[in-house]
């Protein structure tokens, strides 16, 4: 199983709007085709003096090929509106992980 995680850091004044957008728009658009599954949005806690709020958006994906296909064919429809809406008030980075079964 592949875990596709994007960690976002958003300005404090937009964090509630950001969470609402993620729940109402980003997640439904991301999972529409069924390639990304089991969405989970989590708050990331850091140092108290750090300005803003961080969130981790996680999906499960069957394999790397499926994720590469989603990135090539579908991610633009999902990420372009997000970037246009929040512009410089949000930054993010993605991580791809493989679940180790035990």
Image (cartoon, grey):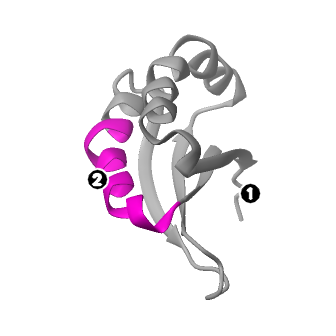
Q: Separation of disc 1 and disc 2 at Cα?
A: 32 Å
In reply to whether residue 98 is colored magenta, the answer given is no
Residue under numbered circle 1 = 100
> In the image shown, does 54 or 97 lie closer to the viewer?
54
Locate residue 14, reporting x and y percent: 39, 58
Label 1: few (<14), some (14–19) or many (≥20) C-alpha neighbours in 10 Å: few
Q: Determine which quarter of the picture holds residue 81.
A: top left
Sequence order check, earlier mark of 1 and 2: 2
Residue at the spot 45% in from the left edge and 26% down from the top edge? 78
Q: Position of residue 30 (x, y in %)?
A: 42, 31
Q: Are marks 1 and 2 in contact (CB under 8 Å)?
A: no
Q: Give the label on residue 20, or none.
A: 2
- For the point 74% across and 57% down, the residue is 100
Numbered disc 1: secondary structure: loop
In this rendered view, identify the residue nearer to me: 19 or 75: 19
Name the image quarter holding residue 68.
top right
Of residues 16 and 68, the one nearer the viewer is 16
* Mark 2 neighbour density, 10 Å: few (under 14) some (14–19) many (20 or more): few
What's the residue at 51%, 33% (across, down)? 83
Highlighted range, magenta: 11-27
Q: What x and y, as percent, mark residue 23?
A: 30, 49
Left or right: residue 29 versus residue 61 is left
In the image, residue 45 above or below residue 12: below
């Amino acid at each position: 199983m592949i875990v596709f995680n994007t960690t976002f850091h958003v300005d404090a004044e937009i964090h509630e709007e950001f969470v609402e957008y993620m729940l109402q728009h980003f997640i439904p658009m991301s999972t529409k085709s069924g390639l990304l599954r089991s969405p989970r949005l989590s708050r990331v806690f850091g140092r108290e003096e750090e300005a803003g709020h961080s969130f981790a958006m996680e999906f499960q994906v069957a394999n790397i090929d499926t994720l590469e296909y989603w990135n090539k064919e579908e991610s633009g429809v999902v990420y372009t509106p997000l970037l246009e809406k929040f512009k410089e008030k949000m930054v993010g980075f993605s991580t791809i992980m493989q679940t180790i079964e035990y």
